[in-house]
């Protein structure tokens, strides 16, 4: 049986008490009324007092019956900084693979919509999304021949990818200020470490003092593991000669490895290290599709697992393994991961066209993009055929 929280039980007791008080006041009134003949004036005064008493009691009941507002009690980081402001993101927009080696399921939408991706929400009004998609089509179709070629799509993908890059640069300026309060343009590892631990709920002044005096920090095992990984990443982002100080540009590479060739290499090494089972620093198909580790407990999980294998097998054989020798090297994975690789952008453009090219003319027409809107935008546009000529 569920047990009520202490404050809930207290509220219940108080409500019960005041309800009994109200009943007591009423009963006392009628008892006195039966014993004594009161004048009309006295009766009205007494009745007025009764109403005031009841009003007071019920007001108190309302106050105590309301749930307590505990928002002020929620634990916040000591310095008021959100942990997400200073931690490298798990997801990188416009990059085909996540930091943990998973395929980026939203990649097609990210490189087709760019910053407009948020506008295409699943609950958005289909008519508005249809109009937005038609506007995008006209922008991609730079020669105005009413169809999109692979070259036009390639140019568009590069443009949208650059939008994500610029967005990361702007966000980095804010994040860098969060860890560089003195504004000297450099952040040391210790300064970052203090801010990170403060975001995890530690007292910033106490941590700073302990680090200054080389005292042992009482940190749980999970947090220490995260810190160790972040320190490795910090070393990699620190351009030669290494001084353990990151400027704004280096901090951008720390948060967004896709902005630096050196950090991109580091990211690839981390992914291969996690997937490589025989230690040869290469990936076979079986190694690449072996993630995630776990047992299949039911049919739904089995279906998910089958989809996982199918998607990764297709990506490995058709895209990542460039020379089709059954082995993916670090160089191949690095080229695959590079979001500003024009050759990859052209291949992606051809793949996107092939998905929706129903008339097999190697181009995309508006009707085809609208019909396959879920692939390009993540949301379905209902009755596309009926509305396309009406609105175009």
Image: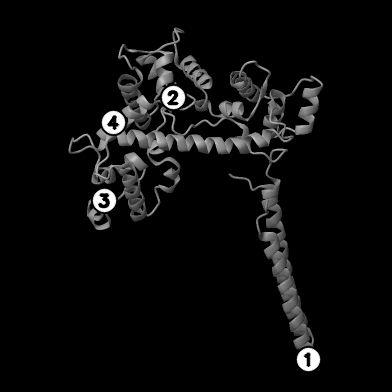
Other residues around mark 4 within 10 Å, as few (<14) / some (14–19) / many (≥20)? some
- First in sequence: mark 2 or mark 1? 1
Instruction: From the image, state whether disc 2 or disc 1 is nearer to you.
Output: 2
Give the residue at mark 2.
338
SS assignment at label 3:
helix
- The circle on residue 384 is 3
Residue 18 vertical placement versus 236 (above, below): below
SS assignment at label 1:
helix
Residue 321 vertical placement versus 185 (above, below): above
- The residues tagged by marks 4 and 2 sit, at their Cα atoms, a distance apart of 18 Å
- In this picture the colour scheme is one colour
The quarter of the picture where the C terminus appears is: bottom left
Instruction: From the image, state whether disc 1 or disc 4 is nearer to you.
Output: 4
Q: Residue 101 in the image: x percent, y percent? A: 45, 23
Res. 108 in view: no
SS assignment at label 4:
helix
- The circle on residue 149 is none
Res. 310 in view: yes
- First in sequence: mark 4 or mark 2? 2
Give the residue at mark 4.
350
Going 66% across and 59% down the picture, which residue do you hit? 66
- The residues tagged by marks 1 and 3 sit, at their Cα atoms, a distance apart of 78 Å
């Amino acid at each position: 049986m569920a047990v009520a929280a202490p404050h809930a039980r207290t509220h219940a007791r108080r409500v019960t008490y005041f309800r009994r008080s109200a009943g007591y006041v009423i009963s006392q009134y009628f008892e006195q009324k039966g014993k004594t003949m009161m004048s009309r004036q006295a009766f009205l005064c007494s009745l007025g007092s009764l109403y005031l008493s009841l009003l007071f009691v019920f007001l108190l009941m309302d106050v105590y019956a309301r749930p307590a507002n505990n928002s002020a009690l929620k634990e916040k980081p000591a310095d008021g900084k959100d942990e997400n402001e200073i931690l490298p993101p798990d997801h990188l927009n416009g990059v085909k693979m996540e930091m943990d080696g998973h395929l980026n399921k939203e990649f097609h939408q990210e490189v087709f919509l760019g910053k407009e991706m948020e506008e295409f929400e699943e609950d958005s009004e289909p008519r508005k999304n249809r109009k937005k998609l038609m506007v995008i089509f006209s922008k991609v179709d730079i020669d105005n021949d009413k169809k999109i070629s692979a070259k036009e799509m390639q140019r568009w993908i590069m443009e949208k990818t650059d939008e994500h890059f610029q967005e990361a640069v702007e966000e980095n300026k804010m994040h860098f200020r969060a860890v560089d309060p003195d504004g000297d343009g450099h952040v040391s590892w210790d300064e970052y470490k203090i801010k990170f631990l403060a975001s995890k709920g530690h007292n910033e002044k106490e941590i700073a003092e302990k680090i200054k005096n080389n005292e042992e920090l009482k940190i749980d095992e999970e947090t220490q593991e995260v810190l160790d990984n972040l320190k490795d990443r910090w070393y990699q982002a620190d351009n030669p000669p290494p001084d353990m100080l990151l400027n704004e540009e280096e901090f951008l590479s720390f948060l967004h490895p896709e902005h630096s060739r050196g950090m991109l290499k580091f990211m690839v090494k981390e992914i291969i290290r996690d997937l490589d089972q025989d230690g040869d620093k290469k990936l076979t198909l079986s190694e690449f599709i072996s993630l995630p580790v776990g047992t299949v407990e039911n049919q739904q999980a089995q279906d998910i697992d089958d989809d996982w294998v199918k998607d990764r097998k297709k990506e490995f054989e058709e895209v990542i393994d460039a020379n089709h020798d059954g082995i993916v090297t670090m160089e191949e994975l690095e080229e695959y991961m590079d979001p500003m690789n024009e050759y990859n952008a052209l291949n992606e453009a051809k793949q996107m066209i092939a998905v929706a090219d129903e008339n097999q003319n190697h181009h995309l027409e508006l009707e085809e993009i609208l019909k396959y809107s879920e692939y390009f935008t993540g949301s379905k546009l209902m009755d596309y055929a009926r509305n396309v000529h009406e609105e175009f």
